[in-house]
Image (spheres, helix red, strand yellow):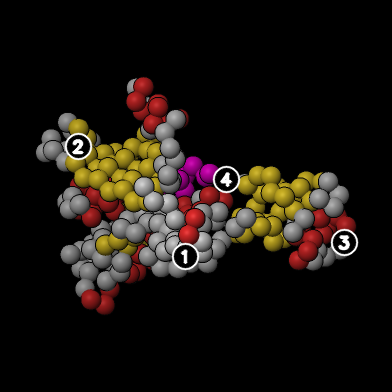
Amino acid sequence: MKCIYCKNEIVKDTRSKEHIIHNALGGLLESSEICCCKCNTLMQNLIDDKFCEMFVPLKSRMKNMTKSRKTKVPSCTGKALFLKDGQIYSVTIKGDAVVNCSEYKRKNKVNLTADDYKLFRIISYDFNIENSALKQGMAKIAMSFAMYKNIKPEILRRCFTTQSNENGDLTHLNFICPIVVFLPCNELDRYMELHSRIDLFHSLILFSHRNLLVCYVDLFNTFQYYVILSETWNNEPVYESHCQMLIKFDRRMPDLHISRMKHVLLE
């Protein structure tokens, strides 16, 4: 098996597990037959870190999120009301708590104690979507899923361009496949989007339509895009899907201890 990016053979010493959807976003599906360890590291620096950073305000608040390996709870920024003076400040947030407020400290030239931070009430989170990083991340997920489902690499290599140094090592990569925003097309789609119960999940659908090979990417059942992987598909039918919940089930045993006989219901 060759690395999809550098085309070098993947051997035991260069094998690397690639998450189809990033581990930092709760993705569990992974493969060791997509890219080598060197390219995996390069993709992290070029695409993954910037892409995952945009979702920190969302994923940092998710309790009991599924992950194949543990990562630290990230911090983000937002606005919070300080009950001491009734003012709204820019703050640093970790999980559901304010952990720093440089604006207040700079304005009043004092430090804040742990008890002070308990008096902040979060009003909003800064959700900064950077268009280029979003497109690159979505395209990478779609292409990785297509590789996982055995779409030929020579077809998928048309989805990106690369640059290498004089030693032949890959230094840059840019996904160029078109990306289309999903919009509800009928009453059923509209109902599912606006009125159905919200359980956070990721889903991927790889499908063909005439001369198109497309991957539908849905993250947090909110960020929904069609990634067009090929516009010269050979009309061979393709339909592959993947869906996973993002919150672990609570498998704790309930307390069934009966302290009084009247609490036992008999029919």
- Magenta region, residue range: 129-138
Structural distance between the alpha carbons of marks 2 and 3: 61 Å
Residue 135 screen position, x and y as percent: 42, 44
Residue underneath mark 1: 257
Residue underneath mark 3: 109
Q: Residues within 10 Å of mark 3 (few under 14, many from 20)?
A: few
Q: Residues within 10 Å of mark 2 (few under 14, many from 20)?
A: many
Q: Is residue 20 visible?
A: yes
Helix, strand, or loop for circle 4? loop
Residue 135 highlighted magenta (yes or no): yes
Return the disc, 4 or 2, that comes first in the chain's sequence. Answer: 4
Return the disc, 3 or 1, that comes first in the chain's sequence. Answer: 3
Q: Amino acid at mark 2?
A: Ser
Residue 161 highlighted magenta (yes or no): no
Structural distance between the alpha carbons of marks 1 and 4: 49 Å
Return the disc, 1 or 2, that comes first in the chain's sequence. Answer: 2
Residue underneath mark 4: 128
Total number of numbered discs in the rendering? 4
Extreme residue in the bottom direction? 13
Helix, strand, or loop for circle 1? loop
